[in-house]
Image (cartoon, rainbow, N blue to C red):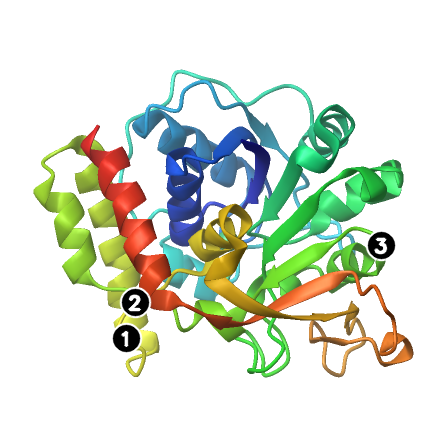
Amino acid sequence: KQKIILDVDTGVDDAMAIAYAVAAPNADLVGVVNSYGNVLVEQAAKNSLEILDLLGATDVPVFEGEPHSLETDSFEVMEVSAHIHGVNGVGEVELPASSRQVEEQSGVDFIIEAAHKYGKDLTIIPTGPLTNLALALRKDPSIADLIGNVTLMGGALTVPGNVSDAAEANINQDATAANEVFRSPLHDTMVGLDVTLRTLLTKKETQQWRDLGTVAGEKFADIVDYYIDIYAEMYPHLGGCSLHDPLAVGVACDPSFVQTLDLDLLVHTGELNYGRTTGDTAHLDDPNPTASVAIQVDEKRYLKTFMEYLNYLFAN
Ligand code: BDR
Ligand code: CA
């Protein structure tokens, strides 16, 4: 089983990513690190704990990471995030309180420790800003050659961004961090808007969870229905909500869900095009590029697997 660490800003789709990681038979979720983004970091950690407990994954430790980007010393939740995910991040749904606490070790130190412990068996899956990973690389650059893979939800190569024409939300939170991660020797698999906007969930699927008659099924249906309603209002042409973050976990567990383009990536950090992910023109002939960018997805097969895993998890 591959060891995985999720680095989340829990968030509705982050919650589904956690569920997928708990359910995937070939993944061993060794920890959930939290960042800021959809909500403040403390709220993200609270949500992650409550979601894990709801799913019976009470042995998965939860860590708090950085509270803001490397570029600032404060953070405020964007109005649009509060709108999309609800002010509490989980669609204004109240979850049973966790009796557990966040670990004392920082999320950044946990990433470093896990890199040394698991080496190539470790995949890190960031579904929020890349601040924690960038800071871990600054503190201990040796981890770049240790970690097996980083499979992140973020960026957009062949389509426009979602917070600006240039930038996708996770990269936009901290373009400096994202650029440092992409320019390090770490191997990154980028699961961005190119594929996540084509991987959709509807109320037909959440009804299946509701029909299970379990607390987990009902709570998840409530959380995701909130998100589906907002998507219907904001992106009526899509016909569902995007499975951004859970697709990254799916690709980490089974890379054959996507087709990729291999290249070296960089992120624009200047005012013009802030947060845009592009190929690094200085390294176009690199025989061993450090990133694989997902540009096609078998969304039908992915959705089938997603529903199999989550139905099973919520039923039990
Ligand atoms: C990403 O932004 C966040 O709001 C979502 O959770 C997802 O990680 C999509 O751009
Ligand atoms: Ca997220």
- 167 up-or-down from 78: above or below: below
Which type of secondary structure does the marked residue at label 2 adopt? helix
Q: Quadrant of residue 66?
A: top right
Tell me, yes or no, if residue 33 can be seen here: no
Q: Is residue 309 left or right of residue 3?
A: left
Tell me, yes or no, if residue 143 can be seen here: yes
Query: Label 3, on which residue?
Result: 184
Q: Which residue is drawn at 74% across and 23% down?
A: 117
Query: Label 1, on which residue?
Result: 233
* Circles 2 and 1: CB atoms closer than 8 Å: yes
Amino acid, disc 1: Glu
Of the pair 306 and 86, the residue shown nearer to us: 306
Q: Does the residue labelled 2 lie within 8 Å of ligand 1?
A: no
Q: Which residue is drawn at 43% across and 46% down?
A: 17
Query: Label 2, on which residue?
Result: 230
Labels 3, 1: front one: 3
Amino acid, disc 3: Ser
Q: Between marks 3 and 1, how big is the CA–CA gap?
A: 39 Å
Which type of secondary structure does the marked residue at label 1 adopt? helix
